[in-house]
Structures are given as structure tokens and as C-alpha cells.
Image: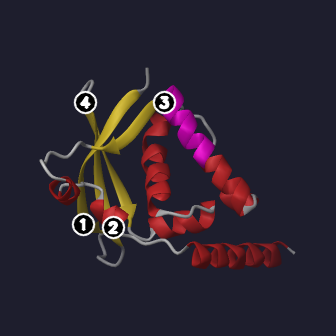
Amino acid sequence: MPDTWQVTEVTDTADESGQIEAWEVRLARPADGVTLAMWLPKMAIENTAVACGLTSADEVIDVLLHRAVHPIYEPDLPDVTPWQMTGEEARAAVLERVERCKRDHATVAAAATKGRTAAARKAGDVLAPLRAVRIDPVRCAAARLQQQRALLRAGS
């Protein structure tokens, strides 16, 4: 049975210079009390969407959260290199990796919010700051194409 990890807190932060805005994402495994903190630059959501051909913030968040815990279970599993594949192949590879983690090792989700109404539960959504990032699939696809062209030119 896969472990369950819960995102318990998302805090605004920055790097030591104060120039790179980020979130500190705290994850907990209730079964044994293990916790970890993940430093996530705010630009990582859109950058991951571009690199991996993802189309929504929820997809990206799922990939990033599972990418944080998957090495605990399979430390020697090589990472997906999305720039060496098409956008469709990159998307399929990273989503397959998330499904593998969920199936074989662990799921990661926001801690359950308590509230009597849908509005109260939404207000208590710990992942709300990350979900607020809007992904423009057309702009991301164009940025990915531009990056792949630059890589091809550099390799020629």
C-alpha cells in the first residue's frame, strides 16, 4: 500500500539575496511523522509546464510534489530529461513517473481542509498560492518550441 504524504503548509519566501521569490512547501507523512521541506521557486511552475509540455497548474503541482518524494523510494531512478524529447513525449514521461510513484510508493495531496461550506474549504486550501499561478498552454508551447530551436542551433 503506497504511503500518503500531505502538504501541510506553503509559506512565501525568497533566496538569501531576496531576488528569487519562492515558496517553502512542508510535507508530512502521517504514518510515521516524517516531514520534509521543499524550496520551490515561484517560476518553477511555469518553467516545468514549458519543459514538460504540461497544460495546467494542477498538473505541474502534482509533478513537482511527487518529484519531491519519489527519490525517497527510488533514489537511483534517473530523472526525466524533457528537452531530449518532444513536448508530447515529455508530458507522457513525467505523468507516467507520477503515476508510478502513486501506484508503487506514495501519493501527495494537500492536507484535508476543515470547513462546513465549500467556500470555507477553498479558503483553507494550503495549495492555493501554487494553484493561483495561471498557465497559458499556448504561450508555454511557444516558449518550449523556441527553447528547442535554440538547443538545436547550439548543437549544430
Task: Tell me whether circle 1 and circle 2 mark residues in contact (CB < 8 Å).
Answer: yes
Q: Secondary structure at mark 4?
A: loop
Q: What is the spatial separation of the Cα atoms under label 4 and label 1, in whole angstroms?
A: 24 Å
Circle 1 packing at 10 Å, graded few (<14), some (14-19), many (20+), is some
The magenta span reads: 95-104
Residue 16 position in % (x across, y down): 29, 70
Q: Secondary structure at mark 1?
A: strand
Q: Amino acid at mark 4?
A: Pro
Q: What is the spatial separation of the Cα atoms under label 2 and label 3, in whole angstroms?
A: 26 Å
In the image, is residue 136 above or below residue 87?
below
Horizontal side, residue 137 vs residue 126: left or right: right
Label 3: which residue? Answer: 73
Label 4: which residue? Answer: 30
Quarter of image, res 55: bottom right
Q: Earlier in the sequence, mark 4 or mark 1?
A: 1
Residue 151 position in % (x across, y down): 75, 73
In the image, is residue 146 above or below residue 128?
below
From this viewpoint, is residue 81 visible?
no
Horizontal side, residue 88 vs residue 24: left or right: right
Residue 18 position in % (x across, y down): 29, 76
Circle 3 packing at 10 Å, graded few (<14), some (14-19), many (20+), is few
Q: Amino acid at mark 1?
A: Asp
In-front residue for pair 72/31: 31
Residue 122 position in % (x across, y down): 23, 57
Tell me which colouring the rendered structure shows: secondary structure
Numbered marks: total = 4
From this viewpoint, is residue 153 visible?
yes
Label 2: which residue? Answer: 22
Label 1: which residue? Answer: 12
In the image, is residue 43 above or below residue 6?
below
Q: Earlier in the sequence, mark 1 or mark 3?
A: 1
Q: What is the spatial separation of the Cα atoms under label 3 and label 4, in whole angstroms?
A: 16 Å
